[in-house]
Image (cartoon, helix red, strand yellow):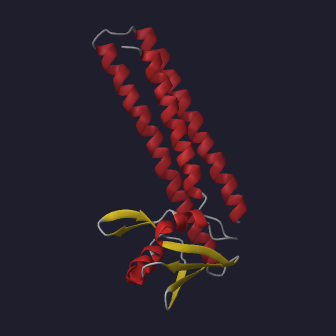
Amino acid sequence: MNIELNIKNVELKMKDSILSFNKLIEKYNLNLINLDIIYNLKIIYYNKNVKLSKLSNIVYLNRNSIKITLFDKSIKNKVRHLIENINLNLTTNVDNDEIIINLPPITVEYKKKILLLLNKDLEFYKIYIRNIRKNYNDKIKYWLKNKLISKDKYIFWNKNIQFLTNKYINNLDVICNKKIKSIV
């Protein structure tokens, strides 16, 4: 049993959560629809989960609009429904074999909605990091109880885990605050 390796795992998991959070909040861009979000949408197509980019041609019409030309027109309604449910308040218009996605006008209400979604995502990732801490603290508590580590070692690793938790939660806050400033 190597507790050093487990502490490194704690940090790796927390770093991964920061990277995931960064990727997630990219979608909250008020000036431009993020094509990656649309490209990576997955749809069930012939009983397989397929990225929308494999089933269509996706291009910008302008800063506030994207045009999706589907290769198979039968999935038009599925795609439209999928886009409307990604919580970005995007509006869709269907025209023959194309779907036009429009970014709504930037209003105070829309900004508030984006900020609420951002804060909800932030809280989710903070909880995730705290759960990582809890899992590893439970492990070292178990090791202490079974006399696999000393009380000093337990205190030392507990403090290290708490330090990492504080560090990565603080990182989340910094990232979120930067995003909030860009929105407001």
Location of the N terminus by quadrant is top left
- Is 170 above or below relative to 146? below
Question: Is residue 166 found left or right of 5 in the rendered image?
Answer: right
Question: Is residue 127 found left or right of 46 in the rendered image?
Answer: right
Looking at this view, name the residue that lies furthest to the front: 71
Looking at this view, name the residue that lies furthest to the bottom: 96
Residue visible at 41% across and 64% down? 50
Q: Which sits in the foreground, 73 or 39? A: 73
Location of the C terminus by quadrant is bottom right
Q: Which sits in the foreground, 29 or 148? A: 29
Residue visible at 36% across and 62% down? 49
Residue 181 image offset from top left, x and y in percent: 72, 59
- Is 108 above or below relative to 41? below
Q: Which sits in the foreground, 39 or 2? A: 39
Q: Which sits in the foreground, 31 or 145? A: 31
- The tally of labels here is 0
Residue visible at 61% across and 40% down? 170
The answer to which image quadrant residue 145 occupies is top left
Residue visible at 56% across and 41% down? 169
Residue 122 image offset from top left, x and y in percent: 53, 52
Residue 33 image offset from top left, x and y in percent: 63, 71
- Is 26 above or below relative to 100? above
Residue 101 image offset from top left, x and y in percent: 57, 80
